[in-house]
Amino acid sequence: MTISELSLSVRDLACERGGRLVFEGLSFSLRGGEALVLTGSNGAGKSSLLRQLAGLLDVAQGVMAFEGGDPELSLGEQAHYVGHLDALKPSMTVMETVSFWRTYLGSIPEGADTALEALGLAHLADLPAAYLSAGQRRRLSLARLIAVPRPVWLLDEPTVALDAASVARLVALMTSHLGQGGMIVAATHLDLGLAEARQLRLGAEALT
Amino acid sequence: MTRAFFALLARDLRLAVRLGGGGGMAVFFFLVVISLLPFGIGPDRELLAKVAPGMLWVALLLAALLTLDRLFQADYEDGSLDLLTMGLLPLELIVVAKALGHWLTTGLPLVVAAPLLGLMLNLPGEAYPPLILAMLAGTPALSFLGAIGAALTVGVRRGGLLASLLVMPFYVPVLIFGVGAADAATGGFAGEAGRQSLLLLGAVALASLVLGPLGGAAALRANLR
């Protein structure tokens, strides 16, 4: 990972879904080593904002500038997005899933073991994803974060279906990512207890 | 980037083999249609031999259409497609990898099955080489042109029928030139006409290798955002 100082600045961002303005005039800036926790009621646009950052949703208005990463790549190509859908294939084993994403996203075919160990999935390596529990599926989804080093993590409710021990494990991984100069934007209803997290409340006033 | 391409292709092949859905189903459908045909038009061996190339092509085309709708939809529904676009591989090459995977798991098995089914229709011996050659040249076009239809209907639930309707006009040239190339040997055409049909079929296939990925990627972009 590039240790050089990262910075993300978002100015006057607006989002439109199905002809409805979800939010507008959203501005924030974030530096490497910082986490931004998005809060707000259902439908306030937390997921939409994360998808915009990931390049999966068009930006209706405003600018996003990401500096300090690879200038050849877009923000989405330097970010991990963990959304509500877990992107798992039932017939692929845990190990195959992580190895695939490792090769596909990072061109690193070997060494998926560490990612599985970090998420406590090593003992399930040969099990097809179809047999995983909801929490295990979520952990397998999160294993991508460790399997492929990327400076920006975009997490949409990452703690859903996780037990207390797994949440603690995730928070430890997030803290270590921030310690290495990475950046996290996470939408959550749960207090993650991250030391350096800043809050951004997506207001309900944009809805009315 | 090459690694990512082959990783995606290998994943699709592996999934197709494990699930057994796509290719196996297409071959089975092909088999069913061709086996029913002699019952439908009666045991007139000369008539069967005459319609054999055309019927084989039509049945192959329908079998290929049957499997198209899941080309992108499975990845779209479970969120994989979002993540695939966040890799370094351009969307056009993602479409190439998926269409190539579709051809290897559906088109190629159909071409292998076609000569066996030709026996059931009393296809004359000299028609086999041109038919197989034409099908080898034509089936990639079915996968690559089909990718456009599949990409356009990726967000539509049960969009298979819509994809078929959209893709059908593009399949017509493949059908015409494919049957033309195989017919030549059964005596319907002079040798020169068959050769020209085969060349035109090759041209259609080559054009589809370019247009399929470009059109498919554009359609996916419009659908994803």
Image (spheres, coloured by chain):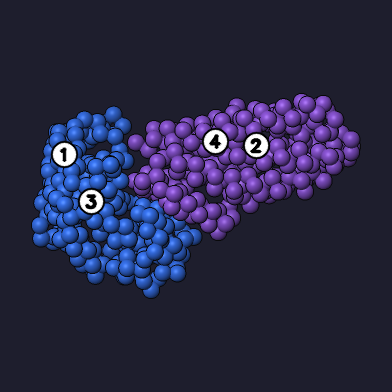
Q: Which chain is purple?
A: B
Above or below A195: residue B172: above
Chain under disc 2:
B
**Residue located beneath label 4 in the image:** B209
Chain under disc 3:
A
Image quadrant where one finds the C terminus of chain A:
top left
Q: Which mark is residue A152?
A: 3
Res. B184 visible in picture? yes
Q: Which mark is residue B138?
A: 2
Which of marks 2 and 4 precedes in the sequence?
A: 2
| Element at label 4 | helix
Chain under disc 4:
B
**Real-space CA distance between mark 3 and mark 2, rounded to the nearest whole angstrom:** 45 Å
Residue situated in front as seen by the camera: B43 or B3: B3
Residue situated in front as seen by the camera: A114 or A21: A114
Which of marks 3 and 1 precedes in the sequence?
A: 1
**Which quadrant would residue B128 be assigned to in this image?**
top right
